[in-house]
Image (tube, helix red, strand yellow):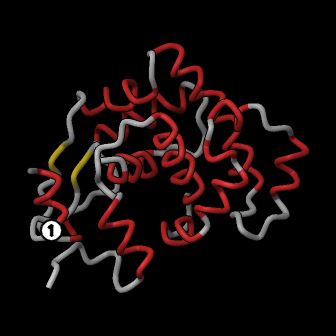
Amino acid sequence: MTTRCKWPGNDPLYIDYHDKEWGVPLHDERALFEFLSLECQQAGLSWITVLRKRENYRRAFHDFDPAAVASMSDDTIETLLLDAGLIRNRLKLYAMRSNAVAFLAVQKEFGSFDKYMWSFVNGRTIDGKRTGMGDMPATTPESDAMSKDLKKRGFKFVGSTICYAHMQATGMVNDHVHDCFRYRELTA
């Protein structure tokens, strides 16, 4: 029997996400933009809600190509507000475009978004050393610093809790519990 973190429960989509993506160190620019964008859509909602709509977001937002998203028109975004496959929150959908613009500015300044984001953890995955779900914080000093700097650069929906969730998802922190098979695989 495979032992994994308890949060995916029995949901096959959640289990697949946990087993293949969550906590894997991510350095691909487009994928980092996708994860940050989806985390921003999550604000106030559960991650599974967003995960179930992920393919719709990929379709609606040019497979998370930051340059294409940055050039989306108001008319296009207004049309997307009618799409039941998305979270129809005007501020969140417009934030996708403004975050794409800020993303491109960070790429230009730092050479890559990857280099910028991973600088908050000194380029290395932090071992969360979690023994259970109760050990996981909602924020850390690193996510606080990331949030503050992203906001300064014009990003929206990037509070410290969202930033910490992003850090977990993209492997900046390994928050798999110690008895989870993925913890062992990702620390090997």
Picture coordinates of residue 100 (x, y %)?
Answer: 63, 34
Give the residue furthest to the right.
Answer: 75
Picture coordinates of residue 8 (x, y %)?
Answer: 35, 76
Image side of residue 151 versus residue 123, left or right: right
Helix, strand or loop at label 1? It is helix
- Identify the image quadrant of the N terminus: bottom left
Instruction: Depth check: give the residue in front, 67 or 131.
Output: 67
- Amino acid, disc 1: Phe
Question: Alpha-carbon neighbours of circle 1 within 10 Å: few (<14), some, or many (≥20)?
Answer: some
Residue depicted at x 33% and y 58%: 22
Residue depicted at x 56% and y 63%: 44
Picture coordinates of residue 116 (x, y %)?
Answer: 40, 25
Residue depicted at x 68% and y 51%: 92
**How many dots with numbers?**
1
Residue 146, quarter of picture: top left
Residue depicted at x 73% and y 53%: 60
Image side of residue 37 versus residue 91, left or right: left
Instruction: Depth check: give the residue in front, 130 or 148.
Output: 130
Residue at image mark 1: 181
